[in-house]
Image (cartoon, rainbow, N blue to C red):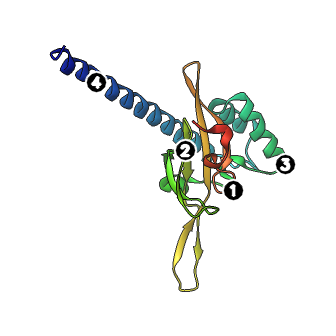
Amino acid sequence: MMKAAPYFLTILFVFCISQVHAQMNSDMQAMHMIKDFYTAYSSLNFKSANKSKLDSVIDKYLTSEEAKKVKQGYKRGHDIMTNDSGINAKSLETMFIKTISDDEALNIETGKEEIIKGVKDAYEISYVNGFKPYSNGAQVGSGPLIDIIVINRNGILKISYVTNGLTNGLRYNSSHKK
């Protein structure tokens, strides 16, 4: 029995490492897909873009359900994918994509630190698309915070949910919790 314990522990260790590696691989693929989407999207101005090109990019990267919501937003003049802030080649250089994982935060009602659960297959996107001057002469980059959920549909990664990360973030919406 004692001889089997190290063997069992080795197998358990290898299994755990392979699971972590698989999740990291999945996250990297999703982050690359998100970057590819925003690269294609940045070349189009949704207000003056050729609608068939815009629809083609949206249909390629979003689920049909989410694409429908995004297109409805466009009809009302709302660019959901950038939270109306726009995106260009310079913005792409500053783009930062991270997984939304468990986080420690202060609960303002109780005054105590609490763990806020992350969201499975969710990513937070931020980038600089302009600068705001302060009274002391300093300029600070400003831009949107966008939360996205990515799903694997028949072996193809698709964006299935998009929301403004500041006012309607996925961390605070219980319907998307792990």
Residue type of the residue flagged with mark 1: Thr
Q: CA distance from mark 2 to mark 3?
A: 33 Å
| Rendered view: 12 above or below 141 | above
Choose the circle earlier in sequence order: 3 or 1. 3
Mark 2 surroundings within 10 Å by alpha-carbon count, few (fewer than 14), some (14 through 19), many (20 or more): some
At label 4, the amino acid type is Val
Residue identified by numbered label 3: 76
Name the secondary structure under disc 4. helix
Of the numbered discs 2 and 4, the one sitting upstream in the chain is 4
Q: Earlier in the sequence, mark 2 or mark 3?
A: 3
- The reply to whether the C-beta atoms of the residues labelled 1 and 2 are less than 8 Å apart is no
Of badges 3 and 1, the one in the foreground is: 1
Residue at the spot of label 2? 117
The Cα atoms of the two marked residues, 2 and 4, are separated by 27 Å
Describe residue 60's horizontal placement relative to residue 89 as left or right.
right
Picture coordinates of residue 114 (x, y %)?
53, 54
Report if residue 55 is visible in the image. yes
- Marks 2, 3: nearer the viewer: 2
Q: Nearer the viewer, mark 4 or mark 1?
A: 4
Mark 1 lies on residue: 167
Residue designated by label 4: 14
Residue 108 location in percent, x, y? 62, 63
Q: Amino acid at mark 3?
A: Arg
Q: Nearer the viewer, residue 10 or 3?
A: 3
Q: Nearer the viewer, residue 46 or 22?
A: 22
Residue at 77 percent of width and 38 percent of height: 69
